[in-house]
Amino acid sequence: MSVLYDRVVDSSLRGRFAELRRNVLQRYPTMTIGGVLLILMIAAAIFAPLLFTVDPIKLDPVVRLRAPSEAYWFGTDMFGRDIYSRTIYGTRISLFVGLVAAALSVAIGLVVGMIAGYVRILDSVVMRVMDGVMAIPGILLAIALISLSGASLATVTVAITIPEIPRVVRLVRSIVLSVREEPYVEAAIAAGTRLPMILVRHVLPNTIPPLIVQATYVCASAMLTEAILGFLGAGTPPEIPSWGNIMAEGRTYFQLAPWIIFFPGIALALTVLGVNVLGDGLRDTLDPRIAKKM
Amino acid sequence: MYAFIAKRMVATIPVMGVVALFVFLMLRLSPGDPAAVIAGDYASPADIIRIRAQLGLDEPIVVQFGTWIWSLARGDLGISIFSNLPVSKLIAQRVEPTLMLATTTLLFAIVVAVPMGVIAAWKAGTWIDRAIMIFAVAGFSIPVFVLGYMLIFQFSLALKWLPVQGYTSPFVDFGKFARHIILPTVTLSVIYIALIARITRASVMEVLDEDYIRTARAKGQTERKVLVAHALRNAAVPIITVIGLGVALLIGGVVITESVYNIPGLGRLVVDAILKRDYPIIQGLILVFSFVYVLINLVIDIIYTLVDPRIRY
């Protein structure tokens, strides 16, 4: 009885928001979980100084290698730096690299893929080059690029982006090839629409939903690669805390102080999980045909 | 059939050509003097001149490329700057542990992932399916080295069941090899298992809707036989494709897993080369790993024709 009563009467703004929340959660459970995780991480990155952190690069040798406690939530490292603060600040690097790599690889891949799909002469050349780049293990390619150009945030981001481009190109090209045979494109050509207009009006909109999904996967993979590079000693310079280089520094002290690796590791895993789950949810919503197959 | 294999083998040449060109241009087109970059911050001008000569950087670029490709064709990958040993020799010394780890991982991943995927497809929509899929998404998200350290922490340090790190050749002491290889194999497998299980589920699910599956069931075939002989066999092509594409993941993962478990393989060679900025080694390993990747995918293309007689080239 009371349930019925609540439902009928609660048409206040707050009630309607609650209703909306229930609906979104019910209809898009995975997307909501992923999105919330990602938003939390973005918030942590933006509001890092407000989240009870101390200076992440402040050395305090008196409190070296302290286990997690009330004063040091995630413990301290071999220089007495607070792992909690370093982990929170490290969110910035990880998200920056992930989001920029996703945006860059999608933008470049879109242009190259459209060219490959529409300009017949260039198609096979472009695709052979992409096959070649795809054959090079991404992490090794990134390592080589960084070892040649020196590690800075910019070079690391570029080095991570390059190996991600071929998959985007392939995706865009395959969409272009199928769309250009569609009757509405033929109709547009017959009506005298020029090529740039066809590309912008008919081809581009078809690439957007799969590209959004692809961008989430690139973002997840770029964040993992960034951490791996940092872990191997080829990542961003040590004066900027990133999850990768925090963990790299913790390697030597692993048996003594496992928390140096665990906390940034868990943060990384959760963020990547959030982005992956968001991607799966988006794919299910935006492209039900593929969703049924996966 | 033989014509197809020959054609497919010829098709790998341009791919390897692009890889070689890419690796070649990467060094030459990088900003600044590549010899100075490789020599590092503390090099004397004499060092830089020596390295420039060693890499042949003072000749015209076309000549450089020609000489380089010619020496590659003879199996010469150049000379390590730090140790002055041929890169091919350094790679040969380190290849065994990596090959062992990659093989155990590949076998373990297939043995675990394919049944997982088939069961998930068979029980689609139930909690078993959901559990397997949650594992698959989580497997994609957990970084290899974090997982590695967690396993060491649990099974080596806390429970003391397995050795912490290191490697023993199976040709020296097989028992010791087995105990050392378990954790690295599990660590490296997880992402691969996630990938294969996911595609197996999708591929088998699609096949399970087919008429011949209903026919097989209708004639009283056991469910196990329906799943394995009818469904899995017909779903095999995408699964095998992903196993091949996943080798790229495997190669990336080997580098990290070897660092975590202190295994003296090719991955460690790369990591040491990064720290010493020994570019010829990095370049040589890129070429070798890319070649292996292309080769494996060539083999897989040939396997298609054996698995699926409908595929005729």
Image (spheres, rainbow, N blue to C red):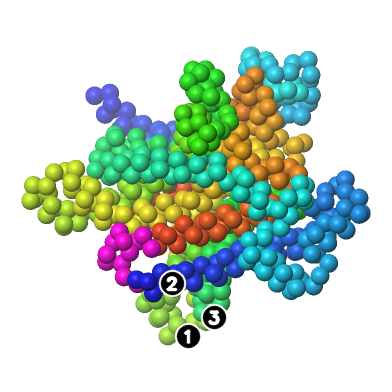
Q: Is residue B138 above or below residue B33?
A: above
- Amino acid on which the number 2 mark rests in the picture: Ala
Disc 1 versus disc 3: nearer the observer: 3
- Name the one closer to the observer, A226 or A9: A226
SS class of the residue under badge 3? helix
Q: Are marks 3 and 2 on the same chain?
A: no
In the picture, measured across the screen, residue A8 lies left or right of residue A106, that is left
SS class of the residue under badge 2? helix
| Disc ID at residue A121 | 3
Q: Which residue is situated farthest in the front direction here?
A: B172
Disc 3 versus disc 2: nearer the observer: 2
Protein chain holding label 3: A
Range shown magenta = B302-313
The residue that disc 2 covers is B6
Q: Which residue is situated farthest in the left direction here?
A: B219
- Amino acid on which the number 1 mark rests in the picture: Gly
Disc 2 versus disc 1: nearer the observer: 2
Q: Is there CB contact under 8 Å for labels 1 and 3?
A: no
